[in-house]
Image: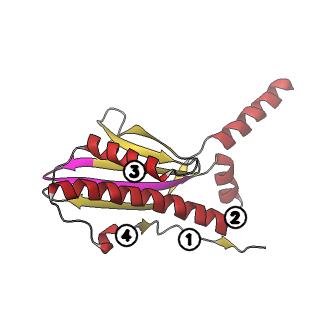
Amino acid sequence: MISVLIFFVVVIFILVAIRPSEIVSRWHHFFDEAQYSSEEFYRVMTESIEKRKIPNSKSWRIKFFESTIISAQREYLRVSNVVYLFDICAAPYATGFFVSWWLRESKSLAELAFERIFRANVRKTYYQMDSQTMFQDAVHQAVLESIEAMTSTKGVRGLTELERQITFNPKLTFQVKPPQ
């Protein structure tokens, strides 16, 4: 009996603790015929994040496999505030330099199971949506500031307003729970 109880406690813990994620939005830009250092970009980016004093955020380097576990790895800068994760890439590519970010929202397995099993449309509150937007905009501004620092020293054209725009996940539909 105790072993069954322990089993269920462990399963519940796993369902709550493991946090897969869903892509909320992304952004990218390729700087043709411009070479930069990924290390330098990540250093400037980290300083820009720290300067903003984003609540509950921390940043660190993380490596992802390019495809399989035997493939090469790419280093990203991760910025997290527990619920949301930014993975920021800065890398030389061909004759240029590429910068991108992916914003993901993490959910517990229990939340995901509830949504899928009951086909529940979990609605976000205004506060939750505003928190997501504030975090996203603060980190995006840090990325743009880091790019500006990088391009201005090399005489490369800055980003246009269109190039600064964020791409939202087309599957994502904000469903707002109105204030009570």
User: What residue occupies the far front of the structure in this picture?
Assistant: 51
Which residue type carries mark 1?
Thr
Q: Residues within 10 Å of mark 2 (few under 14, many from 20)?
A: few
Answer yes or no: is residue 24 visible. Answer: no
Which residue type carries mark 4?
Gln
C-alpha separation, residue under disc 1 versus residue under disc 4: 18 Å
Reading the image, the residue beneath label 4 is: 165
Decide which of tag 3 and tag 1 comes sooner along the chain. 3
Residue 48 numbered mark, or none: 3
C-alpha separation, residue under disc 4 versus residue under disc 2: 31 Å
Looking at the rendering, in which quadrant would you find the N terminus? top right
C-alpha separation, residue under disc 3 versus residue under disc 1: 30 Å
Quick one: 168 or 180, which is closer to the camera? 180
C-alpha separation, residue under disc 2 versus residue under disc 1: 13 Å
Secondary structure beneath dot 2 equals loop
Magenta stretch contains residue 99: yes
